[in-house]
Amino acid sequence: MKRTNLGEFEEIVLLIVAILDGDAYGATINHELERHTGRKVTFGTVHNTLIRLEEKGCLTSKLGGATTERGGRRKRIFVVTALGSRAINDIQQLRNELWQMVPPHFLKLT
Amino acid sequence: MKPGTAPHNQTPPRWAQRLLSWLHPSDTLEEVQGDMEELYGWWYKERGRLYANIRYLISIVSVMPPFIRRRQTRQNYRQPLLIHPAMIRNYFKAAFRSLSKNKLYSFVNLAGLTLGLGVAITLFWIVRFEYSFDRYHSKADRIYRVNSIDRFGEQQPHIHQTIIKTLKTQFPQIEKAANLYGWGAKTVKAGTKIFNQNNVFFTSGDMFDIIDAEWIEGSPKQSLNARGNVVIDDETALKMFGGNAMGKTFRFDNLTDLTVSGIIRKLPVNSEFPLQMIISWETLKQLQPEFKNEDSWGGGDSMDQGFVLLKKGASAEPVNKGLTSLALKHQDDTGIAKFVLQPLSEMHFDTEKDAYNYSMSKWIIYSLACIGMFLILIACINFINLATVQSIQRGREIAMRKVLGSGKGQLIGQFFGETAILVFVAIVFGSLLAANLIRYSSEMLNTQAAQSEIWQGSTIVFLLILGIAVTFLAGIYPAVMLSKFEPIRALQSRLSVPSGRGVSLRSKLIVLQFVIAQVLVICTILGVKQVKYFYSKDLGFEKSGIITVAIPDRNAANCERLRSQIMQHGQIRDVTFGLTTPASHRNHWWGRIKHHAFADGEETFRIQHVDTNYFDFFHIPLVAGRKLTSTDTTSELGTSKENTDVIINEKAATDLGFKNPEKAIGQKLEIWGSKGTVVGVVRNYISEDLKSKLMPHIYFYTTWNLQLASIRIDPQQKAAALAVIEKYWKAMYPNHYFEAKFLEDDITKFYDNEKKLSNFLQLFAGIGILIGSLGLFGLVSFVVTQRTKEIGVRKVLGATVPSIVKLLSKDFLKLVLVAFIIAVPLAWYAMSRFLEGYTYKTDIEWWIFAMAGMLSVVVAFLTISFQSIKAALMNPVKSLKSE
C-alpha cells in the first residue's frame, strides 16, 4: 500500500478542513485549530501546511467569490480530496490496529 | 471594546496592513490579507487590541518570504521544448534580421569590438609571454640568482667567483652552484669566415644541472670540463659550420682556439639565459687569469653572475644569512653589506640589474593589462548604447513574443544569444587582427613575444573566457532592459519613448568612454614629449657625427697608427681613444676611491680611461686645473713610484667637499691601493641614461685600456668616411669582425623602452578614440533618424542649417567636455606618478591637456557633424512627405 506521509500537524489540519466541510479557509481553519487543540499557532504555519497538503494532493482549493466582509477580499476555500480522506482513514485504521496490540495492563497503568 | 460591535469590523492598523502587503508575495496576498483580517477580529474580541496587534504582527512575519511557502502556479499549458529546432531557427532568423536591418549599427558594433578585442588578445599574448620567462626549467622553483647589496645600498647581480666556491663547499643547502660570465658579442673565425657571435658565455657544466637544456651531442658532465671546450647551439652550428660541428675547431676573438665538444638545442626565447656559445670556465681562467683567484672576496666582474640550485625543501634564508656574515668578516676586501638569493621567477621583472636577455618591469605589464581592459570596456559601452537605442525598434517584436507566451528568461536568453553571436564573430576577426599585430609587437614594445608560440591551449581558453565575459558585460543591460518591456505599452503606442533614465545612463557611458580615451591621449602626448626630451636633452658633450669602432687589442701603438692613417683623409675630422665614449651602454668600470672626506672613507667612482685628446674631442670643458698629458701615465700603478695625475668631474669635486672646483686641485686620492693626484676638474655630463643620477668620475691617461675609437666625420660624406675607416681597420685587424656604430644611435637606444612604450600608447590612444567615435557616430545617426520629422518642421518654420547642426551637436559635445573635466585630474595623477621614476623629466604643461581636449572635441565634432549636417541639409519636403 502506498502511504501518503503526513505529519502530526498536517493530519490535524486535514481533519479540521474535513470538519469545516466547505467552510474551510485560512481564518476559520486557524481559528478552529486553536479552539479545538488549545494551542497557539501562527498563521504562517497554517498557510504553509495548507499549501503543502495541496501539493501532496490531499486538498484542493479554489478562490471563492467576492465577499461583503473582510474588505471584499476573496477567500480560498479548501476541500479534502479522495486521496486526503483515504490518508486520514489509513492513519485512523493504523492507530486502531496498534491500539489493539497494546497490552491491557499497560493501558490501565496510564 | 465597545459592546455590540461586530468582530469583523475590527480592522488591523493601517500601517500593519501596509506592511503586510509590502512584505507578502503578491500572488497569495488577497486571501492572506482577508484571512488575517478575520483572525484579527477574533483575537481582538478575545483579548483586546494589544493582543490582536501583537499576534497580527507575528503572523505578518510568519507569512514573509523566507518563511512563506510559495504556491506553485499551475501550468495549464505545456510549454514546447525551449530548444526546439523551430525556435532556434527563429532566434537565428530574428538575430540575423535585426543585424542586417541595422547594418550601420552592426558594423559599428562589430568594428568596435573587433578593434578592442584584437588589441586585448595581443596584450594577452604579450603578458602571457613575459610571465612565461624561465618557468620551463624542471627545477625552476629551486633556482636562485645570488644578488648582493653594497655598503651604499646599491643592488648588484654580479659576484666574485669565490662566493660560488664558498657556496659549494660550506653550505649544505646548495645542491649545485655555478658562475655564468656573459661576454656579449665577440668575433669568431671558422676556417676563413669571420662572424660576429652574440651571446657568448663562460660557465661550467654545473650550470646545465641547474637550468634545462636539450643536449643534441655531448653532456653537461663531459662537454665543459677542459680548457678550450665550447658548446654551441644548433643555430650557431648551422651558421658557422653548415651542419655537423662536433669536434670542429674555430678561432675565438683572435685569442684562442676552441673545439666544439657539445651541441645543444637553441634555448627558448622566453629565457633570461640566451646561451648560444658556452665556453668552459677553464678557458676563462686561461684568458683572464684573475678568475683563478678563488680566495679573495674583493673585486668581481660585473658580467659574472652566480646561480644556485637549492636542495629540495631547503630555504634561501639561511644561505642569505650565512653569506652575509661571511661578507661582513671580509669587510676589508668587499664592499658588500648583504647577500640576497633572488628567485628565478623574479629575474625577468628586475629592471635594476643587467639582464642577459632583457627585463621588463611589472608596472608596464600591469599598465598593458589595464589598457586592454579599458579598450574592451569602451567597445562594450558602444554595444550597450546602440542596443538600448535599437530597443525602441525591437519593442514590438518583444511585445509580440511576450503575448505569444515567451517568458522573461527566454527573452533574456535570446538577447544574450544575439550578443554572443556578435561577440564571437568579433573574437574571430579580433584574433586575426591580433595575429597580425603581434608581429609588430617588438617594434612597439621591448618584447620578443612575437617569436613565441601564440596559439596554445591557453589562448583558446582565454578567448572563450573573453567571449563569455564580454557577452555578459555588453549583453546584460540590454537583455534585462528589453525583456522588461510591457507588451501593452509597446503595442499601443507607435513608438515607445525611451524612459528618461535610459538617456542619462547612455550619457554616463559616453562620458566614461571619453574619459578613458582622453586619459590615454594625455598620457600618450606626455610620453611622446618625454621621449623627445630624452633625445634633445643637452648631455654635456658633443655627440653628433661620431662613429665608434672597437679596438680589439687595446694596443696604443696600433691606435696611433690607425689615427694617422685615417686622418689623412678629408672625410675624417678628428679621432680619440678611450675606454668608452662619455655615454655608453656597457663596459662601465667602477672603482672604490679612498679619501678622508668621504662618509665611509671611500666612494664608488666611475673610471674612464682616456687619451689626451678625449675632452677636446667631445667638447667637455675643463672648469679647473689642466688637461692630462702623455706623461701622466698610469703604467706605474701599484709600484713604489706610483703617483698618477688624474682628472675628476665636478660631481666628484662636490663629493670631496669642494664647492669651488679649483680647491680640489692637488687632492690625493687612493685607488686600488695606489695614489693619484687631482690635476684637473671637468664639467659634469650625463654618462648614462637620463633615468640615472650623476655619478662621480675619475679619468686616467692610459695606453693599455683604450678599447674604443671615436671618430668625428664629415657628416656630408658618411659613406666615404665609413669606407675609409673600414679599409684601415680591417687591414689592421684581419681576424676581427668590423662593426661601426653611430654614437647618436647608441644614445637613442638608451630610451628604446620609453620610445617603444610611447609607440604602443599612441596605438592605444588612437584605437580608444576611434572606438569611442564609432559609438558616438552610431548614436548620432540614431538620434537623427528619430528626429527627422522634427528637423523637417523646424526647417519649414525657418530654422537655418547651422542652428540645426548646433541643436544636434550641443548635447553630445557637452558630454565630451564633461569627460574632459574628469579626465584631466586622472591623467595628471597618472603622469606625475610615471615621471617620478626619472631624474630628468619633461614638465607637465597645460597645453598637453588643452591639446588632448581639443583633439577629442574635434574628433567628436567631426563624427557628429557628418550625420547632423546631412540631416540639416535634407529637404523637409522629403522627410515630411513620407509616413
Image (cartoon, helix red, strand yellow):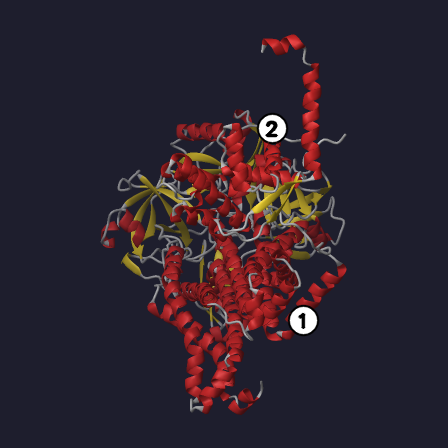
Say how many tags the image has.
2
Residue at position x 68%, y 36% from top? Answer: A84
Residue B448 visible in the snapshot: no
Residue depicted at 38% across the width and 31% down the height: B331
Q: Secondary structure at mark 1?
A: helix
Q: Which mark is residue B97?
A: 1
Q: Nearer the viewer, residue B143 or B411?
A: B411
Parent chain of label 2: A
Residue B551 position within the rendered picture, expressed as x and y whole percent measured from the top left? 52, 56
Question: Residue drawn at (57%, 67%), measured in percent from left and top?
Answer: B488
Q: Horizontally, is B224 left or right of B612 in the view?
A: right
Between circles 2 and 1, the one closer to the viewer is: 2
User: Does residue B246 show up?
Assistant: yes
The quadrant of the picture occupied by the N terminus of chain A is top right
Q: Chain of mark 1?
A: B
In the image, what residue type sits under mark 2?
Glu
Q: Which mark is residue B401?
A: none
Pick the residue in front: B356 or B583: B356
Q: Residues within 10 Å of mark 1 (few under 14, many from 20)?
A: few
Give coordinates of residue B188: x percent, y percent. Answer: 64, 52
Q: Is the residue B664 above or below the residue B306 in the image?
A: below
| Left or right: residue B121 compared with residue B530 | right
Q: Disc 2 on helix, strand or loop?
A: helix
> Can you give x and y, in whole percent of width and height, for residue B860 in the image?
46, 74
Q: Which mark is residue A8?
A: 2
Q: Amino acid at mark 1?
A: Arg
Dots 2, 1 in contact, CB < 8 A: no
User: Against B350, is B868 above or below?
Assistant: below
Asked if labels 2 and 1 share a chain, the reply is: no
| Cα distance in 3D space between marks 2 and 1 | 60 Å
Q: Position of residue B260 (x, y in %)?
A: 70, 44
